[in-house]
Amino acid sequence: MAEKKNSNRRSGRKRKNSGFVGGIAAFTGGGADAAPDVEFAQIASAGTAKLLVGILLLPLCWVSLESFLLLFRDQTIANSYWRSTEFISFGMGSVFWLILFFSVRSRWMMWFYVAGHEITHAIFALICLGKISQLHISSAGGHILTNRNNFLISLSPYFFPFYTVMVIGIWALLDWAFFDFGRAEINWLYGLIGFTWMFHLTFTIWMIRRDQPDLKQNGRVFSFAINFLANMLIISALLIMASPTATFLDFGHSFVANVESFPGRLLDSIRELGTLFLDFFPL
């Protein structure tokens, strides 16, 4: 705990520590010389802007869910993709992780989650041209010290499936450099993708329910909208890459069509709710 306090002091910004949950955050430098009232006004203004953006993104969250369900229906159920060995392998990997998560969750699982969480912070900080001065990982919590922070860096672990991307990357490298994987081996890949993606999903939901500084920093509504939208698009992309018939172009057309029809469908729903309200409470 003392180490975290010293880290906060070196970074020039104080953070509230709350054990394991509070330790999973991107600690940033800079901004310590601003006057308290000016800094508070800037934070309040940024918070209001993110709240408005988050509210505006909520319809896109619904459209992304709707588009994914249509994709799942058309490409998985209607085309019987759910019967394929690849889809079954993905499902078995997912179920296997769920059994582990709800029955034998332990400190080493927490260590792997914290490691993926903090490394993801670091990766996105580097992508945003930041510098990493410290990376701390333990089963009790972790943090990074960086000179840059934004919503992509702070929210990235909640929508970027680090271990799934790592599995796909290592598999592709081995297939290109050393092996020529056949259909039987590909089933193992789908099983690992199901296992790691469910790892990401369960821990993301589990951590979001707790008092996370990453989420409080960006506001609950904005954080929910970004995380939900990004996760829906990523799982849609995984399904498209796995399905033999789905294409990104078709999904894009479906997504755009759902966006264009959303206002009219929303108005129809409001009218229906208004009619029901008047039926129950006539004026």
Image (cartoon, helix red, strand yellow):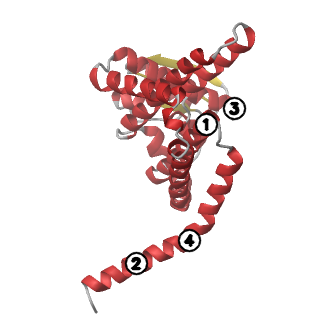
Q: Which residue is drawn at 68% across and 43% down?
A: 247
Report the mark closest to the observer, 1 or 2: 1
> Which numbered disc covers residue 263?
4
Q: In this view, does 140 lie above or below 31?
A: above
Q: Are marks 3 and 1 in contact (CB under 8 Å)?
A: no
In percent of width and height, residue 125 lies at 64, 31
Query: In which quadrant is the N terminus drawn?
Result: top left
> Which label's residue is closer to the chain start, 4 or 1?
1
> Which label's residue is closer to the chain start, 3 or 4?
3
> Quadrant of residue 2 in the image?
top left
> Which label's residue is closer to the chain start, 2 or 3?
3
Specify few, some or many for label 3: CA neighbours under 10 Å numbering under 14, 14-19, or 20 or more. Answer: few
Q: Which amino acid does label 3 sit on?
A: Ile
Q: Name the residue under label 2.
A: 272
Report the mark closest to the observer, 3 or 4: 4
Can residue 5 be seen by looking at this rendering?
A: no
Q: What element carries label 2?
A: helix
Q: Mark 1 points at which residue?
A: 243
**Marks 2 and 4, Cα distance to the nearest angstrom?**
14 Å
Can residue 11 be seen by looking at this rendering?
A: yes
Q: Which of 273 and 132 is in front in this view?
A: 273
Q: Is mark 3 on a helix, strand or loop?
A: helix
Report the mark closest to the observer, 3 or 1: 1
Q: Nearer the viewer, residue 165 or 143?
A: 165
**Marks 3 and 1, Cα distance to the nearest angstrom?**
30 Å
> Which label's residue is closer to the chain start, 2 or 4?
4
Q: Residue at x 38, y 14 (%)?
A: 108
Q: Do the residues labelled 3 and 4 touch (CB within 8 Å)?
A: no
Specify few, some or many for label 2: CA neighbours under 10 Å numbering under 14, 14-19, or 20 or more. Answer: few
Q: Which amino acid does label 1 sit on?
A: Ser
Q: Do the residues labelled 2 and 3 touch (CB within 8 Å)?
A: no
